[in-house]
Image: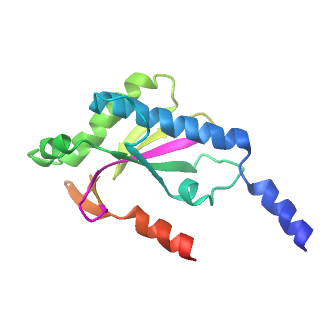
Amino acid sequence: MKKQFEKFNANIRLTENQKSDAKTKYDEVCKTLHNAYYSSSYNGNTKFLFGSYKKKTNIRPIVREQDVDVLFYMPNSEFEKYDNYAGNGQSALLGKIRSILKDTYTTTDRIKAWGKVVLVEFSENKHNIELLPAWENHDGTFKIPNTEDNGSWETFDPRKDIDIFKTS
């Protein structure tokens, strides 16, 4: 039984090429946004990986519905701009991010903004990126946009989920 499990486990784990593809994709998406919002050189400090790729529970084969969840730290100065919109600044924020990414990823299958995220869909069996713009709160949680029902700001705590997973 042990050998069968090891074989099964080896068959569903991402290959090194797939891991590299995922990292390249989310790093480049975040670098694009970093360069649009910050004057400093990109070093990865404006992104936070969460979800299955952070917890290393991602599996293959990679299907269209899978994505890499990554949070992008927005500059504090941008919050007031979108919070002061007369209506649904959250939607305007996601639309702006979508526009920035569309300028860079001109051949990408599809880039769409909805709910709380911007989804960058790459070609079949490649890693899609689900990007969540956010501002970090003093307690380590994040303020995130929600475009539904005329827009609102929500609190999100991906670290709590990661800690629960590590503990289990």
Q: Residue at x 21, y 54 (%)?
A: 151
Where is residue 17 drawn, in percent x and y? 71, 38
Q: Quadrant of residue 141?
A: bottom left
124 left or right, relative to 34: right
Q: Is residue 79 magenta?
A: no
Q: Is residue 99 above or below residue 22?
A: above
**In this orientation, does residue 92 appear?**
yes
Q: Is residue 134 magenta?
A: yes
Where is residue 117 drawn, in percent x and y? 37, 48
Where is residue 160 drawn, in percent x and y? 42, 69
Where is residue 89 drawn, in percent x and y? 18, 45
Q: Quadrant of residue 20?
A: top right
Q: Is residue 120 above or below residue 106?
A: below
Q: Is residue 148 above or below residue 4?
A: above
Q: Is residue 164 above or below residue 53?
A: below
Q: How is the image coloured?
A: rainbow
Q: Residue at x 8, y 46 (%)?
A: 86
122 left or right, relative to 149: right
Image quarter where the N terminus lies is: bottom right
Numbered range of the magenta stretch: 127-141
Instruction: Say how many tags the image has.
Output: 0
Q: Residue furthest bottom?
A: 168
15 left or right, relative to 116: right
